[in-house]
Image (cartoon, rainbow, N blue to C red):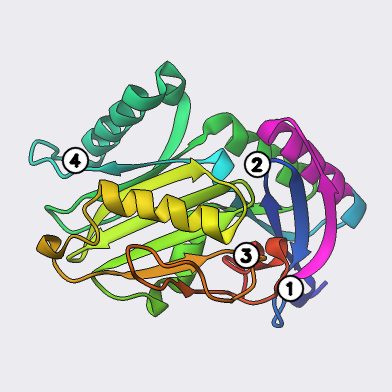
């Protein structure tokens, strides 16, 4: 069997729906979908069923995690941190301060930044990652990556963002995640429940900007505001602090296909 016959599957895991797509040169194509309810465990159960129906026994699997299944925080710079292990411990303590002892078992990823700059950290339940690994292996697939939607979308769209000052929002059904940067450094990261409407997302962005002094003339030039909202029309969004947001899309139109495009060419 030629290596060209290997499948590259992408799945989008959300609280109420799991979608399986097959990656290709023209973008991800639908391979199956199913509704679910009951947190990430039910979502992984649904994924297992979709993989069984697809019958694929060779290739790789990439997972896009809804921000419902990930936790984010800004990690301030500290001169007292002298090693990656100390950085992880410092970051974990920060998550435990917010979420309690449950965060002790979460898997962490921390963005690489230059010395002196804050970092963005994401935490995902270790049990979720282990279950995804087991399901992929059971289907004869290699689990190639697990990427929170916010970070996957940012990585794909980063070349289209202003370099130093921006507000970047990723809106998905029931949730909106926001990254703020000022003077080339991370200022804030937050993921919040949100109604699935342009007005609700704009109101959430207004609040985030106010909390972080965005829009205050004394804080410097106004940032560019970007919204990536899979499944939403690319029409005009309500202004945020007097700034008209720019809608950024990856194509496809369908919410789940567009989320998959964050990790699939």
Q: Is residue 155 left or right of residue 184?
A: right
Q: Which residues are magenta?
A: 29-52
Task: Identify the mark nearer the N-term, 1 or 4.
Answer: 1
Q: Is residue 75 above or below residue 57?
A: above
Residue 142 painted magenta? no
Contact between labelled residues 3 and 4, with CB atoms less than 8 Å apart: no
Q: Place residue 130 in its image quadrant.
A: top right
* Badge 2 element: helix
Q: Which residue is mark 3?
A: 230
Residue found 68% across the figure and 54% down from its top: 12
- The residue most toward the bottom is 26
Which numbered disc covers residue 83? 4
Between 57 and 244, the one nearer to me in the picture:
244
Mark nearer the viewer, 1 or 4: 4
Residue 232 locus on image (x, y percent) = 64, 67
**Tag 1 and tag 2, C-beta contact below 8 Å:** no
Q: Tell me the CA gap for discs 1 and 2.
A: 22 Å
Q: Is residue 36 left or right of residue 198?
A: right
Q: Secondary structure at mark 1?
A: helix
How far apart marks 1 and 3 lie (CA) works out to 32 Å
Can residue 113 be seen here? The reply is: yes
Question: Cα distance, mark 4 to mark 3?
Answer: 38 Å
* Mark nearer the N terminus (3 vs 2): 2
| Left/right of residue 36 with respect to residue 78 in the rendered view | right
Q: Say the numbered circle drawn on residue 133.
A: 2
Q: Earlier in the sequence, mark 4 or mark 2?
A: 4
Neighbours of disc 3 within 10 Å: few (<14), some (14-19), many (20+):
many
Q: Which residue is mark 1?
A: 3
Please check the rendered image and state whether residue 32 is part of the magenta-colored stretch, yes or no: yes
Q: Which residue corresponds to the image point at 58% horizontal and 65% vertical from the top-left?
A: 263
Residue 262's quadrant in the figure? bottom right
Q: Is residue 108 above or below residue 89?
A: below
């Amino acid at each position: 069997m030629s290596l060209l016959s290997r499948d590259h599957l992408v799945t989008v895991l959300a609280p109420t729906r799991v979608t399986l797509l097959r990656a290709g040169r023209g973008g991800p194509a639908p391979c199956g979908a199913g509704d679910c309810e009951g947190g990430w465990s039910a979502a992984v159960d649904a994924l297992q069923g979709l993989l069984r129906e697809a019958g694929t026994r060779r290739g790789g699997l990439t997972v896009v995690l809804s921000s419902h299944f990930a936790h984010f925080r800004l990690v301030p710079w500290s001169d007292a941190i002298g090693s990656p292990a100390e950085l992880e411990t410092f970051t974990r303590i920060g998550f435990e301060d917010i979420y309690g002892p449950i965060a002790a078992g979460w898997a962490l990823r921390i963005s690489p930044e230059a010395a002196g700059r804050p970092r963005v950290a994401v935490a995902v339940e270790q049990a979720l990652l282990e279950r995804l690994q087991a399901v992929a292996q059971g289907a004869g697939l290699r689990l190639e990556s697990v990427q929170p939607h916010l970070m996957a979308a940012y990585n794909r769209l980063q070349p289209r963002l202003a370099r130093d000052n921006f507000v970047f929002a990723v809106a998905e059904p029931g949730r909106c995640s926001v990254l703020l940067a000022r003077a080339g450094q991370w200022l804030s990261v937050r993921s919040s429940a949100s109604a699935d409407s342009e007005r609700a997302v704009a109101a959430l962005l207004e609040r985030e900007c106010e909390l972080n002094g965005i829009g205050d003339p004394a804080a410097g030039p106004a940032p560019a505001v970007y919204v990536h909202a899979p499944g939403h029309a690319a029409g005009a969004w309500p202004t945020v602090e007097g700034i008209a947001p720019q809608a950024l899309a990856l194509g496809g139109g369908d919410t789940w296909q567009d989320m998959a495009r964050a990790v699939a060419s």
